[in-house]
């Protein structure tokens, strides 16, 4: 927990338990819903509440449910020293000490430190090295550097202002060694805000006799009520942090790669987990070490499109130069002309000239880039994650005499290695689906666009209001937790300041396209099986049927988005 920094306070390390004083009863004033202040939490963790905290945690059940996730993850990264900045009643500090980690335990609540110190002695006779400190001034009270900082127990949500959150993360960053990691968890507030509260009561708050549920929730406050068997009740006011917001803050503070787990799983549906765990690496990633900086979803896509099977299949079946959804004049039309028609339709809405600089993110084999360069004379930068596809792009562009107008860059659209305000147009076709952090992609697009620049793209999406369970077969095959939707893109583009957002809905063509690809795959299976393995073709055919079924069921959406910076 964060804590309040009192004027003139001093470091309290190895604090004897009897020197930490009690707090009065909880007090939220006349209107508890107006209490949205970082420092107020010190008045919330009163002695009576802290004494009951372990009933809520249930150390034995939490030990079983959590397993060795944190221990294994820290050991796999060579961690020896750990700063537990949200010690609470000491569960993780004690666990890490028992596993041999050199652990220092920090909290801003004297009551919590008292209980943690007591628990350390009761569970194995450990003497915790406790430090009473405020995260915002962490390095004033905690000395030395650590291999890892852990901030667990949904504690980061006690920070109500972005300024406080940025300052705390900067302090965490500073206390880490050059290659250290931060492990930070939170409730899945996205699910609570968007779908209402449910809890499996399995992983974190395991006490079967204690009820923890939100009494009130809005975008700026999550007020939780904790009801105990003796009919006592306590409350905590917290800030409902959204997952992608936290991931963005971690990157902006300086952390490089950020992985997010849901209830200890690296692949999960957005609304499934009760808790999210972010693992942020401080280690600086140099140019050329791109794989280390790619998200899991991007790395999965990169490995897939770099495979011989995928390259052979897409180049032979999907349309050759254009490997995206087509616009069909009739259901039986060839794939290649329909795919090229999508490119033409997207380009027709742009004011392209020889002076126009275009960035194509997720450019595949570069078919759109060559069409734009040869038709309008504009310069196109192709950014794509597959080195194999990029090699074909460079070769085809050279063969068509377009190398001077087309630059091909290996990279991820989640971290564009390109300058701010550099492009008149950003273009993308059916690529952002593969991102594990689409908000990050849109932020990068907004960054590299010139003022009044245009963003035009297509993406296979979930239909607004669709049942996520219907998308599970598609998501599982792609190793994704979610898909975008028309509503998602409208909302996020507007939030980033891109206005005049228009969506041309061409959803029926999505099922038509996948049906045509499946027909061609089955018709030419004997031919392409010489280059594409059965282990690839059979799952591909199953996957294509899932797309067709999803399109016919109304679960999917597709079309052309246009937005202006």
Image: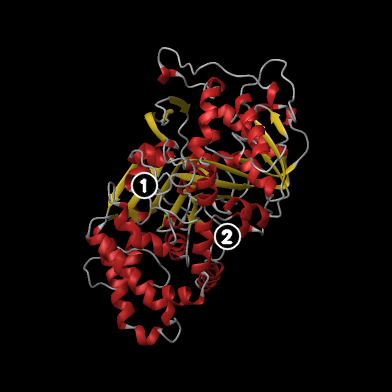
Answer above or below: position of 309 versus 6.
below
Q: Position of residue 217 (x, y in %)?
A: 38, 30
Asked if 169 appears above or below 303 in the picture, the reply is above
Q: Position of residue 107 (x, y in %)?
A: 64, 30
Q: Which mark is residue 404?
A: none
Dot 1 surroundings within 10 Å: few (below 14), some, or many (20 or more)?
many
Say few, some or many: other residues with alpha carbon within 10 Å of mark 2 (under 14 / 14 to 19 / 20 or more).
some
Q: Which residue is mark 2?
A: 409
As drawn, is 297 to the left or to the right of 180? left
Residue drawn at (33%, 52%) of the image: 560
Q: Is residue 494 something one can see in this rendering?
A: yes
- The numbered dot on residue 562 is 1
- Give the quadrant of residue 6: top right
Given residues 435 and 275, the one toward you in this image is: 275
Q: Residue at x 62, y 32 (%)?
A: 168
Q: Tell me which residue sits at (40%, 67%) in the image.
A: 323
| Alpha carbon separation for disc pair 2 and 1 | 24 Å
Q: Quadrant of the C terminus?
A: top left
Depth check: 334 or 508 in front? 508
Image location (x, y in percent) of residue 415: 56, 50
Q: For numbered disc 1, what is the local secondary structure?
A: strand
SS state under label 2? strand
């Amino acid at each position: 927990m964060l804590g309040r920094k009192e004027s003139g306070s001093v470091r309290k390390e190895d604090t004897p338990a009897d020197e930490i004083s009690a707090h009065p009863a909880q007090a939220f004033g006349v209107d508890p819903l107006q209490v949205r202040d970082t420092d107020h939490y010190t008045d919330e963790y009163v002695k009576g509440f802290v004494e009951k905290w372990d009933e809520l945690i249930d150390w034995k059940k939490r030990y079983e449910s959590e397993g060795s996730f944190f221990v294994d993850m820290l050991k796999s990264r060579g961690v020896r020293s750990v700063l537990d900045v949200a010690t609470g009643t000491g569960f993780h500090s004690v666990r890490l000490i028992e596993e041999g980690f050199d652990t220092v335990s920090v909290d801003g609540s004297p009551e919590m430190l008292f209980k943690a110190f007591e628990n350390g002695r009761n569970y194995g006779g450990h003497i915790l090295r406790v430090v009473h400190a405020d995260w915002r001034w962490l390095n004033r009270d905690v000395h030395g550097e650590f291999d890892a900082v852990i901030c667990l127990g949904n504690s980061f949500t006690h920070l109500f202002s972005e300024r406080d959150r940025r300052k705390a993360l900067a302090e965490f960053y500073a206390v880490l060694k050059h290659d250290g990691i931060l492990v930070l968890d939170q409730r899945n507030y996205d699910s609570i805000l968007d779908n209402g509260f449910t809890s499996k009561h399995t992983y974190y708050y395991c006490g079967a006799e204690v009820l923890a549920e939100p009494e009130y929730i809005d975008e700026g406050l999550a007020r939780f009520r904790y009801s105990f068997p003796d009919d006592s009740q306590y409350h905590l006011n917290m800030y409902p942090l959204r997952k992608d917001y936290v991931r963005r803050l971690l990157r902006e503070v300086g952390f490089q790669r950020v992985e997010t787990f849901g209830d200890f799983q690296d692949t999960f549906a957005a609304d499934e987990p009760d808790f999210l765990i972010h693992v942020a690496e401080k280690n600086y990633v140099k140019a050329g070490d791109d794989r280390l900086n790619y998200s899991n979803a991007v790395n999965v896509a990169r490995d897939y499109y770099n495979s011989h099977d995928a390259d052979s299949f897409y180049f032979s079946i999907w349309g050759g130069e254009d490997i995206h959804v087509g616009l069909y004049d009739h259901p039986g039309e060839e794939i290649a002309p329909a795919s090229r028609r999508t490119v033409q339709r997207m380009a027709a809405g742009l004011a392209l000239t020889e002076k126009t600089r275009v960035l194509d993110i997720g450019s595949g084999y570069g078919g759109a880039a060559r069409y734009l360069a040869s038709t309008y004379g504009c310069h196109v930068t192709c950014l794509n994650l597959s080195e194999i596809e990029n090699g074909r792009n460079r070769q085809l562009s050279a063969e068509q005499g377009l190398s001077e107008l087309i630059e091909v860059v290996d990279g991820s659209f989640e971290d564009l290695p390109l300058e701010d305000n550099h492009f008149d147009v950003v273009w993308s076709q059916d690529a952002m689906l593969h991102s594990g952090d689409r908000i990050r992609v849109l932020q990068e697009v907004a960054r590299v666009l010139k003022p009044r620049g245009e963003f035009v793209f297509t993406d296979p999406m979930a239909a607004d209001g669709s049942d996520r369970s219907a998308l599970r077969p598609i998501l599982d095959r792609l190793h994704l937790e979610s898909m975008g939707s028309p509503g998602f893109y409208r909302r996020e583009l507007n939030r980033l300041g891109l206005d005049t957002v228009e969506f041309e809905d061409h959803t029926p063509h999505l099922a038509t396209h996948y049906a045509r690809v499946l027909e061609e795959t089955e018709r030419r299976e004997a031919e392409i099986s010489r280059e594409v393995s059965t282990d690839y073709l059979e799952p591909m055919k199953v996957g294509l049927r899932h797309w067709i079924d999803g399109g016919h069921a109304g679960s999917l959406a597709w079309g052309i988005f246009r937005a202006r910076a």
